[in-house]
Amino acid sequence: MPRSHHAAADASRPAVSTREALRAIFNRNFTVVSVINLLVMTAYYLMFVTSTAYARTTYHVELSTAGLTAGIMVIGCLAGRFVTGNLLSLYGCRVILPGGLLLYSLSIAAFFWVPNLPLLFVQRLCMGVGVGIIGTATGTIVAYVVPHEHHGLGISIFSMSTAFALALGPFLGILICGYSTYTVLARTCLGIGIACIIIYFGLRNLPEMRHRHRPFFALYSYIDPRVVRFSLVALIACLSYGCIQAFMTSFAAERDLTPAASLFFLLYALMALVTRPLTGRLFDLRGENIIIYPALLLTSLSLTLLAHSESSWMLLLAGLTLGAGFGNFQSSGQAVSLSLVSRSRFAQATTTFFIFFDLGIGLGPYIFGFLVPSLGYDGMYQALAVVVLGSLVAYYFLHGRSAACRA
């Protein structure tokens, strides 16, 4: 149920210790889907960070064209997320999750028979669709198997798998390509896909999600309008993270900070891993405002630090600040989305939030990249710091005021 429906019940329920909350969260299904999400996202980032260089080297195309091999994976991920919410309602996670894993593994296997660039685009698109299906399915399963009163902590812990993959994937991708070949990298990703299919059979007593009365062609069957207002905040905030991902390498090279840049996302992930259990517990006890407002402020501060980074320590400090800020906005944002809908709409709520989340990450580099020639990277990041402050104001009007009234 939405949080307002649970307010009275939650008020009368005695508080439980963190140890008891963790015991309730770490059931068999939670552990299995977290491992699947970790492995899939690691393989995704393995290919994502190396796709542009591979296409440019293999097919001798311009940088913008080669970059489409990565961009089209994001498009596929958005498409996969969009359809998955309703498919989960129609067929349940027992069909959709293994279907996504199979599509993901087959699309990676298809790489070994790709003879030209257009078919590489198709292969990357299918892989992105698979990632979108798997990510939405695992996130929805977690929403069902974690007790409602522990959603903040449970989803924060689950999302740590994505944060860890964000650091591990690029590191392994660069390492493999530096010491071996792209074929070895693709075989590694295929092995991960097959391993995830095997791990899937460890799930037991999966929750029932099917609601066949929903019309297939109705938009309401795929997204939930109640989550759109909050998701607009996520879209605005994610513009900044997309630019950090896309331009970090070039920005660091321009300022002779490449060694520090290689640790930037590792420190981001480390800070997210350290702080998410605490912020998740605070979310459950005090509500979302105590997390979202500081998270957006810290994200804006990290962009300001990044814009003025002239030394390695300042760049690394920006990474730590980003992990404490944006890293916690992501996990808390998903929990907020689930609090706005009934249990039967968890799949659509997860889909809606991550569509806007991924769209912001994808649009950011295209929109703000035009500022670089005139303002430089520092001007672009400073402009994004202001944009994130704007998302904080938007959050207050679109969700924060009503959340404060319900608290």
Image: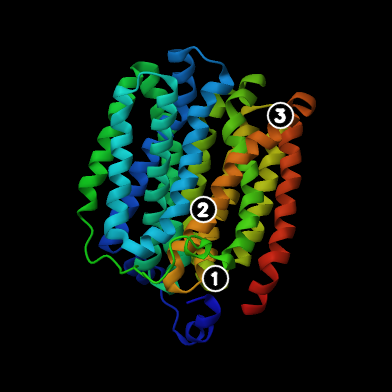
Q: Nearer the viewer, residue 124 or 1?
A: 124
Say which label, 1 or 2, has the lower sequence index: 1
Name the residue at 33% across, 35% down. 107
Residue 377 relative to residue 125: left or right: right
Question: Label 1: which residue?
Answer: 340
Say which label, 2 or 3, has the lower sequence index: 2
In which quadrant will I find the C terminus? Answer: bottom right
Name the residue at 51% across, 75% down. 2
Q: How is the image coloured?
A: rainbow
The answer for how far apart the CA atoms under marks 3 and 1 are is 38 Å
Question: Label 3: which residue?
Answer: 377
Residue 317 visible in the current orientation: no
As drawn, which residue projects farthest toward the right? 374
Question: Label 2: which residue?
Answer: 354
Say whether marks 3 and 1 touch (CB < 8 Å). no
Name the residue at 62% across, 40% down. 363
Q: Secondary structure at mark 1?
A: loop
